[in-house]
Amino acid sequence: MRIVLVGPPGAGKGTQAQFIASHLSVPKISTGDIFRANVSGGTELGLQAKQYMDRGDLVPDEVTIAMVRDRLGEEDARDGFLLDGFPRNVPQAETLKKILAEWDARLDIVLELVVDEDEVVRRLSGRRTCDRCGRIWHVDFDDKQDDICDDCGGHLFQRDDDKEEVVMHRLEVYRHDTAPLVQFYADENILVGIDATGPVEEVTKRALAALRPLEK
């Protein structure tokens, strides 16, 4: 099965991608993983991407797409995959469609994790990271009364990209770039929305229920 997972920051895409891919026995492919593999491997594409990443710039579409094409061409992805973080916009989606068509393949389903923006802000702005062990705690979900890590005694701090104003900006970017992508896949009749609120296990059940009719 070939799946794309979309949703705003804080929707839980990374967590759900891991569970769904494991259930279907297909590789979970994220642009972050692909970037790291190419950079650490010193590939030509990795060296190109690193120049942009080191400057804090977005990696251009043509480099990202070339990396994704290479990854999807690997043996473990021949019969299926789950894409997390790609495509991010309509041009990338159109290119992905062409790549798959070259291999006489197509996407089976696009799962959209649907969550209210207020909930996204609460989830992300409430996160605190331990400066010693790196564990992430949440001021609401973990009932934390202090800024000390219960695991190692390290100090908890709020990462810059978890600050409310930054989260609001990320949501604005998502609405601008990715909302048209959702409509693109709706027009392709392969978009299914999943309520991404509630316990992780419940969200996973909803996602797997949506996939069940497609499982062979």
Image (spheres, rainbow, N blue to C red):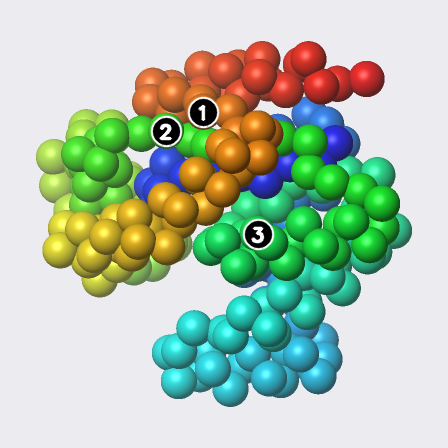
For disc 1, the marked residue is 193
Q: Secondary structure at mark 1?
A: strand
* Residue 93: image tag: 3
| N-terminal label among 3 and 2 | 3
Of the two numbered discs 3 and 1 on the same chain, state the one appearing first in sequence.
3
Q: Secondary structure at mark 2?
A: strand
Residue at 45%, 15% in the rendered image = 202
**Label drawn at residue 114:** 2
Q: Amino acid at mark 3?
A: Ala
Residue 59 at what x, y percent from top left? Answer: 49, 74
Q: Are marks 1 and 2 in contact (CB under 8 Å)?
A: yes
Q: Is residue 146 above or below residue 43?
A: above
Disc 2 residue type (three-letter): Val
> Could you tell me residue 108's position as x and y percent?
69, 31
**Does 102 sit left or right of 134 as displayed?**
right
Q: Position of residue 216 (x, y in %)?
A: 81, 17
At 45% across and 46% down in the image, what residue appears?
Answer: 181
- Identify the secondary structure beneath mark 3: helix
Number of other residues with Cα within 10 Å of mark 1, as a class: few under 14, some 14 to 19, many 20 or more: some
Asked if residue 72 shows in the view, the reply is yes
Q: Which picture quadrant has residue 33?
A: bottom right
